[in-house]
Amino acid sequence: MSTSAEQLTALPSFCEGIQHFGEAWPNFSQFADSPVIAADAAAIADANDPKAAYQTMLGADALRYVTLQVCGSKSSGHPGGFASSADVHAALMMLGHTNIVTEVGHHAPGFYSSMFLDSSLEAMNIFTMSDMMQRFRETHGLLGHLSGAIPGLLSPAGPLGQGQHFAMAGAWLHRDILFPVTIGDGGMGEPYVLNAMMHFHTAYPDVTNFLPTLIWNGYSQEHHSMVSLHSNADMINYWKGHGFDEVVLVDAAEYDDSQQTGAFVDSTRFSFAQRLVFAQAVLTGVDRAARSAMSGKLTAFIIKQLKGAGVHTVGAKSHNLYPADTLDAAHIIEGLQRRALPPEGWQIVRDNFSRAGGGPAAKTVVTERELELLPLPQLDMQAFAKGEKAVPSTAMGALVAQVGKADRRFVVSNADGNEASAMKNINDALKIRHPTQDPLYNQSPDGQVYEPLNEDACAGFAAALALFGSRALWLSYESFAINGWPIVQTVTQAMAELRRKTPSIVTMFTAGALEQGRNGWTHQRPEIENYFAAMMRNGNVYPLFPCDANCIQVAYEYATDSYNKGMVIMASKSPLPVYLSLDEAREAVEEGAITLYESTSGDKGTLVFAVTGDMVLLPVFEARDILEADGYRVRIVAVVNPRRLYRSSDIAWDTVSEPDGRFMDDDRFNALFDGDVLLAVSGGPSAPLEPVLLRSRAPRRDTLCWKRGETTASPTEIMAFNGITADAMVARANALAP
């Protein structure tokens, strides 16, 4: 549409690069003469004010426009899903609720548009629409899916089914702030979304200041959503069946005056007058839901509107742009022109959004500042004597209890039970959070141990708390950890990008495969250790393999004292020999490895065992006896922190927040691992030993490690099934020896 030179001259500078402008809306001078959020306010004064509804609709169209143009600039990105949420997003902003998270990574362009319009992206030197287009989906710019590194955005979003954890963590940490979380109906196929919220509400019934906001638009990424045939009553009952007391649903179809067909309609096709009625309904509905959530009721808000509402097309076809979807394409131009704001409207949107919540999100949302942490006392460790037997997991549990006693905000999550992992001492001290008080089972309504029977919920809440600035610990059987690990991966990547310090996410996986013989392969899944090993190269992920009960205490202290990292501890729950003093354990954790034993004589060559794990050391020491009797010198080295054993060039350590560039030098490494034969031994897979195999100068090398699970009567039998026995080690050493 035509715009006069005088109007363009008056445009605010951030509009440079906007390609289309529209005519002034009806009654613009009456309802948009000044921002409805006053200069000294953080929200509109009255959700029923027609001026507020008018300017909310203006904000929604601005969001749609920027989203479509920025995606069109790269013929890439996802405008459709956010487009159907723009009305509710704008309403939340206008009501001052700007701590918004999402589970939908595909809504990223819309969230970036919100941060652009409220001026948050200026912290990234994105000042104009041209800047935004240039930086969209580029290195050091606005990545394709949400990242907490973007100013004003609280958390990452990519894999479905994760966003609710961040909202719940935020609500738990900040009881006076509302944390809306937008959820797409495409993601409703992930059943643990509502399941996780239901368990959280049972455990923390007084924490209701998070607002799940379902964007029910009928479509997923490439097809209809699985809930597209639900009636409104079905959907409300679905949420109420998961413990929600209040469900506010606004269905665009009830306001349609444009004769659209189907259950899902596009509100931007209504007459202008009816669009305003719909905007008013969304604004007052969101206000009602927000007030309900903040007053102690578990509440959900649902907006039912066709996917792609207000952009270039609708349905699943609106989800993603492709190479033909350029800013010169007729259908993109038409979509932009339909949403084009009058020139004088842009400053109104900027003023409202930049005042919402008390200022631009980059300066006001809770994750833009470090959460104050209570200082921890020096942890009181038990110094086990060398040679005695002690349970590693129990030794760590005593320290976990101390952390929880010192920091009442500290949460331990565990799906399978601490008692089963020989960590009952955690439950004794901190209590399982449960509505049924029962001292026999250590249950208490104010406990610090969170136990949903869902590893995703365990990992999600702990990881989200850490990302938002609080201490947490996720405990799991190694076997089941894979069900919760994806969100830890998401969070550790986010921590690598953050512009602030936050406590590391600490995890500990007990009951390694070697202890689970009688349960069979269902409980024997150590392959996840390969996942951790691959992530070491990220720069901020540390798999730790303490070799005994002293070493695990030091490892837990090391992990708890760190920032912006993923710390993964693996240990057994059986009584095992102690090899190191506490001081030696500190050396092992800090340096990466330590010698547990070295022969004083032998003339047939030196055999080096590089070992990750604790129980697997039993057959290694048994093999030592046989090999020494045969005339070999034997050195047994515990690889405790393999991240330290890589070369600095192997790791992206200098690309992450809170970088750690400490690596073992060549002289120290060679002193540990030089020999005629190197055998890399693990009770799990071999990948954590990669740095040793990469750097070793031993002329002959091999690995003995996990192959697969089987039902056996003892750890000895499962090791035998996998070829991890003293006899196998001796045979391999003899075959390799010069």
Image (cartoon, rainbow, N blue to C red):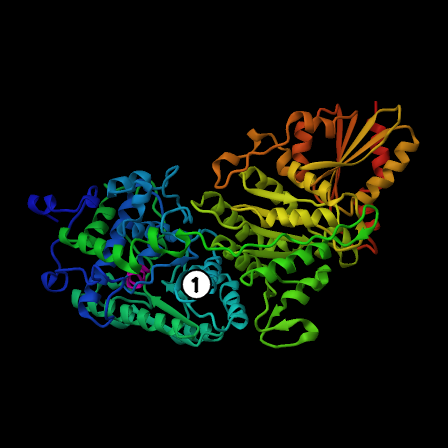
* Local SS, label 1: loop
In magenta, the rendered stretch is 85-93
Q: Position of residue 380 (x, y in %)?
A: 68, 54
Residue in the image at 19% along x and 63% along y: 36
Is residue 378 or residue 40 the one in the foreground? 378
Residue 544, by quadrant, is: top right
Q: Is residue 310 visible?
A: no
Residue found farthest to the right:
629
Q: Position of residue 248 (x, y in %)?
A: 36, 73
| Residue at mark 1 | 174
Q: Position of residue 60 (x, y in %)?
A: 26, 58
Residue in the image at 83% along x and 36% along y: 729
Q: Is residue 477 visible?
A: yes
Q: Is residue 734 left or right of residue 101?
A: right
Quadrant housing the C terminus: top right
Residue 617, by quadrant, is: top right
Is residue 614 or residue 221 the one in the foreground? 614
Is residue 555 magenta-colored? no
Is residue 136 or residue 172 the one in the foreground? 172
Residue in the image at 42% along x and 75% along y: 297
34 lies above or below 489: below
Residue found farthest to the front:
377
| Number of numbered callouts drawn | 1
Mark 1 burial class by Cα count in 10 Å: few <14, some 14-19, many 20+: some
Q: Position of residue 471 (x, y in %)?
A: 54, 56
Q: Main secondary structure of the magenta part?
A: helix
Amino acid type of disc 1?
A: His
